[in-house]
Amino acid sequence: MRCLSAWAALLLAFAAIPASAVQVLQPFDDSRDPPTWRPLTDAEQAQHELGLTVFNTSWRPAGAARAGRIDGLGPVFNAASCDACHNNGARARTTVEPGLIPVSMVVQLGGPDGKAADPSYGQVLNTAAIDGFQPEAQVRLSYVERRGRYPDGRPWSLRAPTYRFDELRLGPLRSDTVIKPRLAPALFGSGLLDAVPASAVASDDSAAGRFGWQGNVPSLAAQTAQAFAQDMGLTSADFAQDDCGAADARCRAAQSGGEPEVSDDFLTAVIAYQRLLAVPASPPLDASSEQAGLVLFERHGCASCHRGSLPVSGIEGLASIAPYTDLRRHDLGPGLADRNVSGKIQPSRWRTAPLWGLGYAVRRPPYALLHDGRARSIEEALLWHDGEAASARRRFERSTVAERNRLLDWLSAR
Ligand code: HEC
Ligand code: HEC
């Protein structure tokens, strides 16, 4: 009975939110408490606060004193909280420099067929461990600088990364294991990307999902459970195995923090929390700069992938969003492709990176662009575009310096 009336109250409160109150882009006045894209009911507010708390929680090893319901971290992991990588929901707040990779960069491992994990190390090379265990490895990166010139003679410079693995606890990686370095993306607007109907993204691409840099994870819920398991070593009802490799018996036998380690209410709350996060708005450009930038963006062919409008379904008061992505996967050429341990290029398809919220990252350095953070600026990110995006890049390169700057300014205001 009590339960029923609470439900009725929730429905009433929900009905009281006017559809016009939906606002996807919002100023982020306090980065520590990002706004939601619609007002919340009281019940939602409580769940939102729980979700935020779970997001910020540093999980503890199984059996830790007074760890209550937040134990089970590891035994191997990358970071102890979601927030350590997705700072207040934002993309990794770091540059990616030569030396040890930042915490918010995760090296995933792929089998030669693109699916099976490494038998010793699992899906993710975990660079941290709880007391009594050792990390799987340490990853160092170095760059080779590539210099070139625009057709008008102005110079540019890009950095191509290579990765080195030290202290590999269970022996060398197989030479055909694919190295997949990935920097933590922003979570803003994830719930809205989740609400784009499959029919609007459908393609003949069998590996297609919509989350992750390769768009290979089907939903926000799946991505969250996978993050708990693979990046933090925490099991949940949706993902019952943490990331011990099949051959790592000691890791598999480690003490558990409960069955599952992340309880259902925590998992549900952190998913609900992300689902409602708005996208940071940038200060508007003057009307003529806005128009001129958009014309170039369209004329160069950027908008064919970075689509300015996608439909959403199931959200009252919102028919479409402007994420600047088609949520599809594209081959951007060998320069951006993953490589295996012996250096062989693996043809790779990437989800068109959403450009909404880009200005927020650029206004709050440090930041890094592209899936592995190699690009130090928006300009560098554009110059890496090749493969299916080669002609768009060439049109950018051939435009005048004034036009290039106009487009870059426009992009920094997304
Ligand atoms: C060690 C760093 C790290 C931790 C901890 C981490 N993530 Fe991530 N997250 C990443 C990386 C890296 C990616 C990109 C993965 C990929 O491209 O396959 C990602 C991707 C995501 C995405 C997909 C976003 C998109 O648009 O594609 C979501 C959602 C997400 N993480 C949520 C979470 C949540 C919730 C937690 C905590 C339970 C969490 N993450 C913990 C690093 C991390
Ligand atoms: C064929 C599809 C395609 C076209 C055309 C294209 N892009 Fe992209 N864009 C992508 C993909 C895919 C990525 C992610 C690549 C990666 O991370 O390795 C990306 C990444 C980016 C990024 C970095 C975003 C981030 O979060 O790191 C920017 C900025 C960008 N594109 C702008 C442009 C502009 C401007 C144009 C036109 C000159 C353009 N793109 C044309 C597919 C495309």
Image: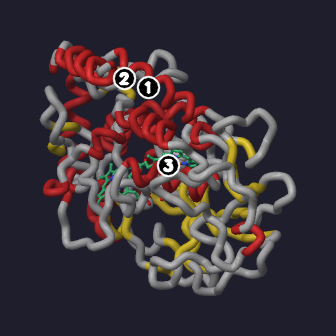
Residue placed under numbered mark 2 in the picture: 44
Residue placed under numbered mark 1 in the picture: 48
Query: Is disc 1 placed on a helix, strand or loop?
Result: helix
The numbered dot on residue 193 is none
Spatial separation of the CA atoms under disc 3 and disc 2: 33 Å
Spatial separation of the CA atoms under disc 2 and disc 1: 6 Å
Residue placed under numbered mark 3 in the picture: 369
Query: Is disc 2 placed on a helix, strand or loop?
Result: helix
> Could you say which is closer to the camera, residue 283 or residue 103?
103
Q: Cβ of disc 3 within 8 Å of ligand 2?
A: yes
Q: Residue at x 77, y 46 (%)?
A: 63
> Could you say which is closer to the camera, residue 119 or residue 331?
119
- The picture places residue 222, in percent across and down from the top left corner, at 41, 54
Vertical placement of residue 33 versus 236, above or below: above
- Residue that extends furthest to the right in the rendered view of this protein: 132
Tags 2 and 1 in contact by the CB under 8 Å rule?
Answer: yes
The number of numbered badges drawn on the structure is 3
- The picture places residue 329, in percent across and down from the top left corner, at 31, 64
Look at discs 1 and 3 and give the one toward the viewer: 1
Q: Quadrant of the N terminus?
A: top left
